Image (tube, rainbow, N blue to C red):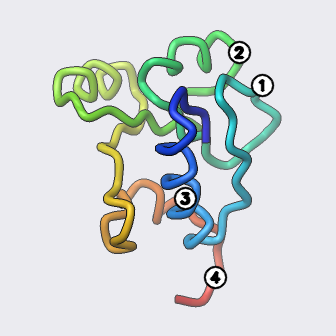
Amino acid sequence: MMDVSALAAASTGEHLRALGFTVQVAGGVVPFAGQRLGVVSARLAERALEAGWPAGHLSVLSESAAVRAAWAARGLRVTGRPVRAARDTVPDAWVAAALQGRPE
């Protein structure tokens, strides 16, 4: 989870852990090293691509519909930030990328 907000990254990291992901929370872009999914705030998405992240391995978070549309047009998964307390708000793209065989 790459985000400029530690609080937002921690919350999103909780959702990803609930799906069975191993999550590293970073305040900036980490290099791509074969990770299954990189969740990145929109402010860091361009730097993530420059750091070698394939578009298919990124999910961009933004509250702005226009920003999400722009990143989706570039082939990236996009989502709004999930609500902290509700596991059922986890974006479908994350569920689809979750580790196989994890019990509900």
**Residue 24 on image: x %, y %:** 73, 47
In front of the other: 78 or 2 = 2
Indicate whether 62 appears above or below 67. below
Distance between mark 2 and mark 4 Cα atoms: 30 Å
**What crowding class fits label 3: few (fewer than 14 Cα within 10 Å), some (14-19), or many (20 or more)?**
some
* Residue ID for mark 4: 102
Q: Residues within 10 Å of mark 4 (few under 14, many from 20)?
A: few
The mark nearer the N terminus, 2 or 1, is 1
In the displayed orientation, state which residue is furthest to the left: 65
Label 2 sits on a secondary structure element that is loop
Residue at screen point 22% across, 26% down = 69
Q: Earlier in the sequence, mark 2 or mark 4?
A: 2
- Residue of label 1: 31
Amino acid type at mark 3? Ala
Label 4: state its secondary structure: loop
| Tag 4 and tag 3, C-beta contact below 8 Å | no
Q: Which residue is disc 3 drawn over?
A: 97
* Foreground pick, 103 / 23: 23
Q: How many numbered marks, from 0 up?
A: 4
Q: What distance separates the C-alpha of mark 3 from that of mark 1?
A: 19 Å
- Disc 2 and disc 4 in contact, CB within 8 angstroms: no
Q: Residue furthest front?
A: 7
The amino acid sitting under disc 2 is Ala
- Mark 1, Cα crowd under 10 Å, few <14 / some 14-19 / many 20+, is some
The label nearer to you, 3 versus 2, is: 2
The quadrant in which residue 70 appears is top left
What residue lies at 57% left-to-right and 38% top-to-bottom? 6
| For marks 4 and 3 on the same chain, the one whose residue lies earlier in the sequence | 3
Residue assigned mark 2? 51
Callout 1 secondary element: loop
- Mark toward the start of the polypeptide (1 vs 4): 1
Residue at image location 42% in from the left, 24% down from the top: 42
